[in-house]
Amino acid sequence: MQPSRTARQTGFLPFILHPSSFILFFFLLAASASAAGLTGTVKDYSSGRAVEGATVSISALDLSTSTDARGRFELAGLPEGRYVVNLAKSGYHGYTYEQVVTDNRKRYRVTIELKPTEEGEHTAAYHEAQPRYRMPEVVVTTTRASSEYPVTFNNVSRSEIVENHYGQDTPLLLSELPNVSVYSEGGGGMGYSYLRMRGFGQDRIAVQINGVPLNDAETHEVFWVDLPDFAEDLADMQVQRGVGSSLYGPAAFGGTINLVTRTPGVGDQPGIRAEGMYGTWNTRRAMVQFQSGRVAGRYGVTGRITRMETDGYRYGSWARLWSYYLAGARFTDAHTTKLIFYGGPEKVHLAYEGISKDHLEGKITGDKEHDRRYNEFTYPGEIDNFFQPHYELHDEWRIRDNVQLDNTLYLFRGDGFYDQWRSGTDPNEYYYSGVDTSITEMDLLRRRDVAETDGGWIPRLSLDHRYGNTVIGGEMRIHDARHYGTVLWSTYVPQGSSPDYTYYDYGIAKRSFSGYVHNLFDLTSRLRALLDVQAVTHTLEMQDDKQWGVRWEKSYSSLNPRVGLNYLLIEGDTRVGRPAGTVYANLSFAQREPRPRDVYDPQDYWSLPLNVAHRFAGTEGDYEYTGPSLSPERLMNVELGTHWQWTRARAGVNVYHMALTDAIVPYGELDNLGVPKSINAKKTVHEGIELIGAWSPVDLITVSGNLALTDHRFVDHSEYDWALEEMVKRDDNRVGFDPIYVANARMEFSRWGGKAALGIRSVGKQYVDNTENDDTAVPAYTIFSFDLGYRFEKVPSARALELNLRVNNLFDLEHETFGWNYGEPLYFVGAPRAVYVTTAIEL
């Protein structure tokens, strides 16, 4: 059947005319900007704990507010001028200081320490002698953005994380952000889950934890399954779309995800929190977390351990996960030093293949519910086992008021394997000699192992000066890995071979070095300019190939400039209801090097010297790969957006144009011997518009939402069509695996410790390949979620007790979330209605 040529041209119209779209647009007042004003944290001078309920006021403007449970406050809409800020709290001495506002675009941040009026067993002199932890406003511009930056981003606060997290994988926690699509192999959201942003898979999305790159050095992938329940340890998250402000680590094409863990001893109180959760498909979670608060004025410690188990929605998609987190911090007037450990062993039964259309429609057994849960991995031992502990050491040194030097050392080591049952396999693909020509098929159990070590150093020097801010930094990362595959058992063993036969065994080394200069200049009181340049080099090497003696080495270098402007259109003033409005533009370049397996794949039988000797030089046991050499992928990203902030609403919109040159496409064509090989697609363009915003008509209710309309297509690309068995041009075809639109809306109600929320998520049609074939596409779907919870304060023998209910797919709607087509279209099903109940107690 010929692919449809009208889908891309008319894909937006049905959505725009659909009645539900008007409901979504009603919610979309869009924005991601922050109003100018004063924000800060109030702490106990002697303990460093957050002070809740302190009154913060500016009498000249008739403004006042109170600090929350974490000691935080915000006063918005301050015009330029000098103001006397007063703080008061029962049990503490009053505090008064002068705040000078010179730029109404800025959000001024302060940390204030109140001294107790009752010193208890310690004297006032004792408290005066204690070192105080200072929290100056230093925006780490190379990993995070603020409202002054000409980049497109969203912040997710700690309170938002807590409200939405029930134990699901991190991609699902991020699913309500703009232009993000997600799917889970098992359907239930725990185990192996994936996300895409602006049509780019997570191997083209840079992920960092505390500024440390998380993407795998070889595949660029992110394995969220190794970090279950990690949201419990986060202070906040920032998601930048596009190239953004990331200047080291893996290349950010689709975006950058910055995860920041909580600093122990800052704004926390000594205590223990325990949680238990039970839900559909025998899903259960138990978590215990402790925090020390500030100890002796200098130290803080926090830790957590979690056990999670689920049987999974699909048959045989169970997961058994451990997770831990331990962090310690030491504070002085000039230094903050943190030591952080996290990780957890995981065991997950394989479910990485989708299901056929006949399974979706119940044509296999006649029982549709049963067929949709099918998983082709039925052998009980097909289990993924992996453990990757992380170690981080961070030091922040405030050399002077305007100079800060940060250093990060990190190490993580991964070790694991998975077993696979293979039926009807050609013996020659595993046993390379001695195979009886009369034996054409065999069954076998194989094991694939990997052991890898990554370590690095990230220095960063930040300087505030009269013209703005400059950051000079870099990264050095060293990666070494060993890959080996073993035939554990087979129905046929050639003469001369032995059990536990190793059919591949090789090492991969990668060395990455980058340096950058980042500048944010104040051109005028309203206009700020971003000027960055990054130099990066990667050296990849295959070495010590035990089976074939293949070796190769490749180096990739690039110089990537980034420029942008941010202009304050209107200065906000809450007294007269005037909003704050900004507009920004950004032009950025990035480059991503090929993966080692894009160069040569020693795990692929058809790529070995045995089959394609023309791709190698040398003799057996000492081969040098000389085959096709792929070019790095190069991206040019143009952003244009505007942000607006009212007293009770935020609004904004941005458009993007992303021109990708030499995108690496696996199995894009056949070589002169008919063997598949990866190629560079000459040109691809990703374009779209994104809206995001929120509105709070009264204090009790908040309505928020976002919408992304996308047009991601090939401009110049030909690929091998496996059905037609010939090269076919895909010019002007939509890129596969990417929804035409993504929309989210959420209404929240909160009062007196209770909360209720209704969420709506609508995802457009997704093609499962690059043919634009409507018959095989993943249909559009809309699902609803519901949250209900209550926090009981000061219950007997406890500080607080919480009860929370989460219902996914509230109306039990049938849907698929992802699919692909490599000869046969296969689909990943979304789970039906699922209910999770969580209880928590704080001591």
Image (cartoon, rainbow, N blue to C red):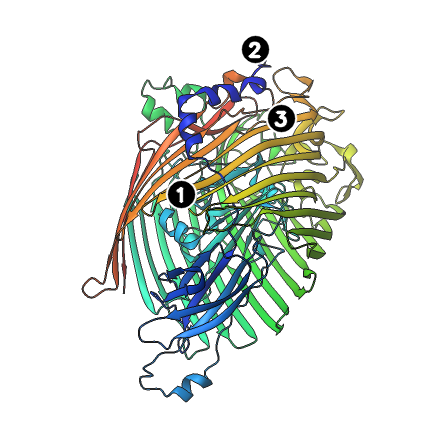
Q: What residue type is labelled 1?
A: Met
Closer to us: 28 or 621: 28
- Relative placement, left or right, of 214 versus 558 is left
User: How many other residues sit within 10 Å of disc 3, few (<14), some (14-19) or many (≥20)?
Assistant: few
User: How many other residues sit within 10 Å of disc 2, few (<14), some (14-19) or many (≥20)?
Assistant: few
Closer to us: 20 or 373: 20
Give the number of the disc on residue 190.
Answer: 1
Place residue 834 in its image quadrant: top left
757 lies above or below 109: above
Q: What residue type is labelled 2?
A: Met
Q: Which residue is drawn at 46% across and 63% down?
A: 40
Q: Position of residue 124 (x, y in %)?
A: 39, 86
Which quarter shows the C terminus?
bottom left
Q: Position of residue 679 (x, y in %)?
A: 71, 31
Closer to us: 190 or 153: 153
Single out the residue that lies furthest toward the right.
Answer: 618
Q: Is mark 2 on a helix, strand or loop?
A: loop
Q: Is mark 1 on a helix, strand or loop?
A: loop
Which is nearer the N-term, disc 1 or disc 2? 2
Q: Is mark 3 on a helix, strand or loop?
A: loop
User: Is residue 601 visible to us here?
Assistant: no
Residue that mark 2 sits on: 1
Q: Position of residue 394 (x, y in %)?
A: 56, 66
Residue that mark 3 sits on: 437
Place residue 234 in its image quadrant: bottom left
Q: Which amino acid does label 3 sit on?
A: Thr
187 lies above or below 112: above
Q: Position of residue 454 (x, y in %)?
A: 60, 57
